[in-house]
Each structure stands twice: as C-alpha cells, then as structure tokens.
Amino acid sequence: MSIWILLYGLAFYPILNNDRPIPSDVLPKLIVILVLFYFNYFYLVPEYLLKKSVLIYLFVSIGLLIIAVAGLNHFYEPKLQEDFFLERQPPRGFGYMPIYRSFINLGIPYVISAILRMYVEWKRNENLRLSVEKENIKSELQFLKAQLNPHFLFNSLNTIYALSVKKSPDTSDAIVDLSELMRYMIYEADKDLVPLNKELDYIKSYIQLQRLRLSDSENVSLKITGEDRGRAIPPLLFISFIENAFKYGTDYKGKTYVKITLIITDVAVYLNVRNKIGIFREPTKNSGIGLQNIRNQLKLIYPELHNLEVENDGKDYEVSLTIYQKQAKP
C-alpha cells in the first residue's frame, strides 16, 4: 500500500502544487489499475502463468487491458484546461495517442504485478528447496553418525577384549575409559556442534584407551597447539582417522608408530595423523565405513571449506585435514 501511495503521490504532486485541475479519468483509472493489478497477482498469474499456460494468460491479459482502455476512453474522456501542459500539442492522426497512453498506464502496473508474483513464488520455492535440502543433509548426517557409533564401539570392544585375553590389570581401567567415551557419544554425538575442547578430551581418552592395549606405545604421541576456547566442531569428526592409524600402525613386532598433530589457528583447524604401515590386513566389506563416512560428512558440512589429503607410499600412511573458518579460506 505504501508503494501505491508513493507512486500516485508523485503523480499528483505537480498538479496539486500548481493548482491545476485533476483530470476526470484519474480516479477511475486508478481504481481500474488496482483491480487489474490484484486480479492478475492473486488469480491470473497463479492460475495460468505459473501453470505454464502462457498463451491463455497472454490472451486473457491483452483482452482485459483492451476492455479496460476502451471503457475508460469511452466513459471518462478527460476535460482539461488548454494550458494544463505547457506547450501542449494537439492530438495527431486519428486520436490513437490517448488510447496508447492509457494502454501504457494500465499495462505497466499489470506487468509489474506479474513480475512481483513470479518473484514471490520463486522466493517461496527457493526457501522451500533450501529447507528440504537442509533437512536431507541433517537426515544424512544422522544416518552417517548412526553408522559411525557402532563402528567405534566395535573397535573399542576389540581393545578391551585384547586386554582381557592377556589378563591385563588395565582391563578395568579400560572399561572405565570406555564408559566415559560412551557417555560423550550418548550426550554429545547427536549435536550438530560441540565445543572443540570436549572433542579434544574425547580424543585424549581414546588414545589413553589404546595405550592400555599396546605392548609398546613409546612412539604414540599427541601434540595439540593453539587456543581451543570458543571454537566448535561437529562431534566425532577426527576419530575415524585416529582409529585407522591405530588399526594399521602396529608392526609384526608389536611396536606402534602413530603421530597425531592438531594445530588450531584463527582461520583453520589442522589435523595430521601419520602411522607406519604395520601388519597387512586384507580389506573387508565394512573396513572403510568410518573413513568414508567422514568424507561424506566433510562434503556435507564443509563444502569448499575443507581440504583432505591422504598419502600412502607403502610404508607410511598420512592423513592431513584442514577445516577453514567461514570466509577464511585463502
């Protein structure tokens, strides 16, 4: 409504400001314009144009405009003073100019109403598409997490089983560590984001659990640098890379070589996991679920905002992952 007031206020201002008479057809023309505008906006565009019936829409629209122009020119012929416009020129030809002007005056708001309605519908559909896409991504992430959690539990139980077979006194400590890890998974893993310091505590507990089962963990290290306060990250994002390193990083002598480096800067979080390739294990159908799930999560959560590199030279296996802050990627 404010747009209408502004437009027609500007149109009437020169007339009212100079004490000129208002043409007799202005009010009827305004009423017709409003009727055509909203009839087109609420009925014709949704019923025909948006349903791809373009020819019918054009035929009806042109017909309405012709009828409106003919009616206005027949019933409301403007009567103005001769000096209403300075240097006013008399009509030329067969008087087509007044009809042409009326057609333009009615047609422009009519076209604007169609454009406006199509934009509103496009915007609504775009918002709906984004909402559905967001829900699909959320559902897919939940599905990936649902796969990842049993995968982690399976590996952890294998660790405790190995300790129990050796009748290790550390078995009870391992069970306590596992319970803390499970607590984190139950109460935090279903969230979209968790504080980075909680995720790091989880990683430390997991590495401690792995140390308990290793016969030689001298070459297992975790180095964290940078400020983790106030940072957040999707839960369980790094753990699959670390699990994989422990799974394949033990050689035939029982020695394990796993180096984990995590660097936190203002613009990115950088993870590097490197392990010696120890005992060869034949790949199984489900052996790559964890890593593949993380790849999929990264594509969904950080499109164009992450860089994942994997190197395997037959002796060393190295994963480098960089997650950039938004608007921080070089």
Image (cartoon, rainbow, N blue to C red):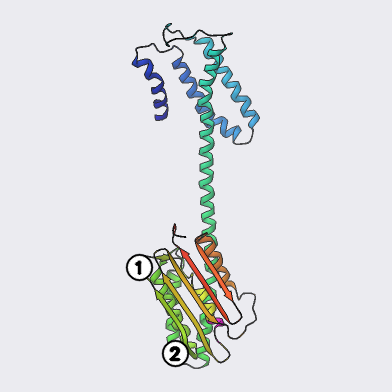
The majority secondary structure of the magenta stretch comes to helix
In this picture, which residue range is highlighted in magenta?
246-250
Q: Residue 244 or 58: which is nearer the viewer?
A: 244
Rendered residue at 44%/59% (across/down): 328
Q: Quadrant of residue 79?
A: top left
Residue 270: % across, % down: 46, 70
Q: Which residue is mark 1?
A: 229
Name the residue type under label 1.
Arg
Classify mark 2: helix, strand or loop: loop
**Image position of 245 with respect to 38: above or below:** below
Classed neighbour count for the residue bearing mark 1: other residues with Cα under 10 Å, few (<14), some (14–19), many (≥20): few
Which quadrant holds the N terminus?
top left
The question of residue 74 being in magenta is answered with no
Task: Count how many numbered circles sit on residues in the image.
Answer: 2
Q: Quadrant of residue 45?
A: top right
Q: Which residue is mark 2?
A: 170
Residue 309: % across, % down: 55, 70
Residue 176: % across, % down: 42, 83
Q: Residue 180 or 243: which is nearer the viewer?
A: 243
- In the image, is 88 to the left or to the right of 289? left
The question of residue 249 being in magenta is answered with yes
Name the residue type under label 2.
Asp
